[in-house]
Image: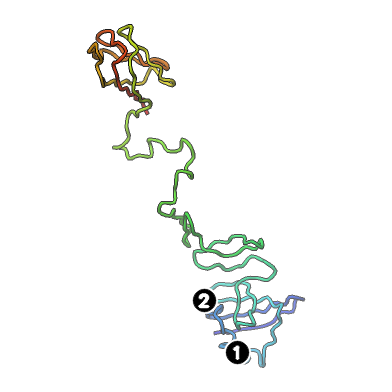
Amino acid sequence: MITQIGRYFVGLPNIVGIVTDDNLATITTTGYLNDEADNIEALNNGEFQWEDTDLVLIHYSPNQIGFFVRDASNATFVANPPAGGLANTLPDGDIFVGNASNVATGVTMSGDATIDNTGALTIANDAITTAKIDDAAVTVAKLEADLQPSHVVKFAGQHTTAGGAAAEAITVTGAAATDLAFVQMVDAGTNTVSVVQAQVTADTLTVTFSADPGADAIINYQLLRAV
């Protein structure tokens, strides 16, 4: 209930000071001033004269204080100063955001994240999409230690031999001499050759066969790069 009320004439707007043992939810409930009308009249020794421009400074439970305005149509207080000022109270877990009228307004964070009244931010499930991740930001270090590979496949392809020599150079743009080569015979061709050696140099994979492979041997290759 309201235990003290008084008007302080400081020019327009005046300040009305109130002390109550009610909490924020109660003093902002519709009809609160109607419920407190008899109590206010007794404290004021008569009917209290409200002005539409009054700023109401309320000390309320639990040991909180803030400015309000009177909502005459709903007989309650609104925790939001006039003329677009920043409210000095904020609902549990809400944050201030400027609205379309450039007024700071309490809203609940939603969308990709939520926030609680301790300031802890929680990312929503499935909120982190590919478009929201910076290029090159996903590294092997993001994997669990026992899942981190030593190498990854950097290049792969299939090659049909041209023939003319036992060794054949395959252009692999971007290949490095430190890459590891894996070569698999898919079709040994009419000369029935096998792979003897695979060597990587800059931009090139050189495969040596057991003989001239002719123009119809087919191999698959993979180049692995250390991470």
Q: Residue at x 30, y 22 (%)?
A: 220
What type is the residue that disc 2 sits on?
Ala
Q: Residue at x 41, y 17 (%)?
A: 171
The label number, if any, that marks residue 124 in the structure image: none
Q: Residue at x 65, y 76 (%)?
A: 69
Q: Which corner quadrant holds the N terminus?
A: bottom right
Q: Find residue 168 and report its horizontal and vertical position in percent.
A: 34, 11
Q: Residue at x 58, y 88 (%)?
A: 34
| Residue ID for mark 2 | 25
Quarter assignment of residue 7: bottom right
- What is the secondary structure assignment of the residue under circle 2? helix
What type is the residue that disc 1 sits on?
Ala
Q: Which corner quadrant holds the C terminus?
A: top left
Residue at the farthest right position: 11
Residue 28 lies, with reference to residue 124, above or below; the image says below
* In this rendering, position of residue 27 left or right of residue 9: left
Q: Find residue 119 and report its horizontal and vertical position in percent.
A: 48, 58
Q: Find residue 105 and report its horizontal and vertical position in percent.
A: 60, 64
Quarter assignment of residue 218: top left
Residue 20 lies, with reference to residue 174, above or below; the image says below
- What is the secondary structure assignment of the residue under circle 1? helix
* In this rendering, position of residue 119 left or right of residue 69: left
Residue 27 lies, with reference to residue 40, above or below; the image says above
Q: Nearer the viewer, residue 171 or 201?
A: 171
| Residue ID for mark 1 | 37
Q: Find residue 128 and report its horizontal and vertical position in percent.
A: 44, 48
